[in-house]
Amino acid sequence: MKFISILLLICISHCSLAQDNLNTKQMVGFGCYFSGQQTKPVIKVAKLIEDKKYKDISSLLNSKNEGERYLAVITLQRLADTGKYQLSQTEKELIEKAKLSDDLVSVCSGCTYFDKVPMKTMLSEKDLIGSSYWLDRVLKTD
């Protein structure tokens, strides 16, 4: 029993240390921690979608916050794909630039997955952390 307690303490401390190098203000997650909560950038972009403030989402393509930039890219692409938004040439160029970016996006999923992933990986791998499901849900209320 004592061994299990020590092992559990080591695992918990390791998980908290792994999370220390992540930027929680920029983190993207649709169901993080034990409670399954959304992160601040996700909540912010969801509210902009709900309010149909697509130009405000577009302005996030220039954000220094990698999480917001990632969410702006996937949101504007989906809006354009569904005919709800017309991308400008500048927006298309910024999206293409993001697809090549090595900037690291802090991500989380559940209570155990916390990582930093290059923007280009986030945008090249289909539904890496559940973004498609989130967009489906959020845009249905649109």
Image: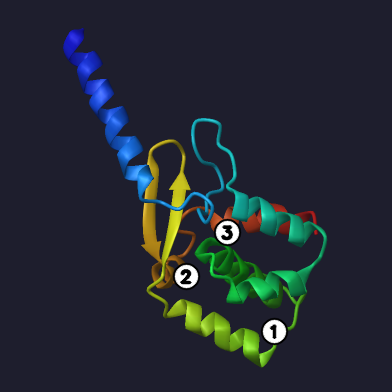
Q: Earlier in the sequence, mark 2 or mark 3?
A: 2
Q: CA distance from mark 2 to mark 3?
A: 11 Å
Query: SS for tag 1?
Result: loop
What numbered label is drawn on residue 87? Answer: 1
Q: Quadrant of the N terminus?
A: top left
Q: Which residue is mark 2?
A: 123
- The three-letter amino acid code for the residue at tag 2 is Leu
Q: Residues within 10 Å of mark 1 (few under 14, many from 20)?
A: some
* 58 with respect to 10 (left or right): right
Q: Which quadrant holds residue 119?
A: bottom left
Tell me the mark number nearer the camera, choosing from 2 and 3.
2
Q: Earlier in the sequence, mark 1 or mark 2?
A: 1
Residue 30 position within the rendered picture, expressed as x and y whole percent measured from the top left: 56, 48
Q: CA distance from mark 3 to mark 1?
A: 19 Å
Q: Residues within 10 Å of mark 3 (few under 14, many from 20)?
A: some
Query: SS for tag 3?
Result: helix
Residue 99 position within the rendered picture, expressed as x and y whole percent measured from the top left: 46, 78
- As drawn, 20 above or below 72: above
The residue lying at 64 percent from left, 58 percent from top is 135
Residue 102 position within the rendered picture, expressed as x and y whole percent measured from the top left: 37, 74
Q: Which residue is mark 3?
A: 132
The residue lying at 47 percent from left, 70 percent from top is 123
Residue 37 position within the rendered picture, expressed as x and y whole percent measured from the top left: 58, 39
* 1 with respect to 35 (left or right): left
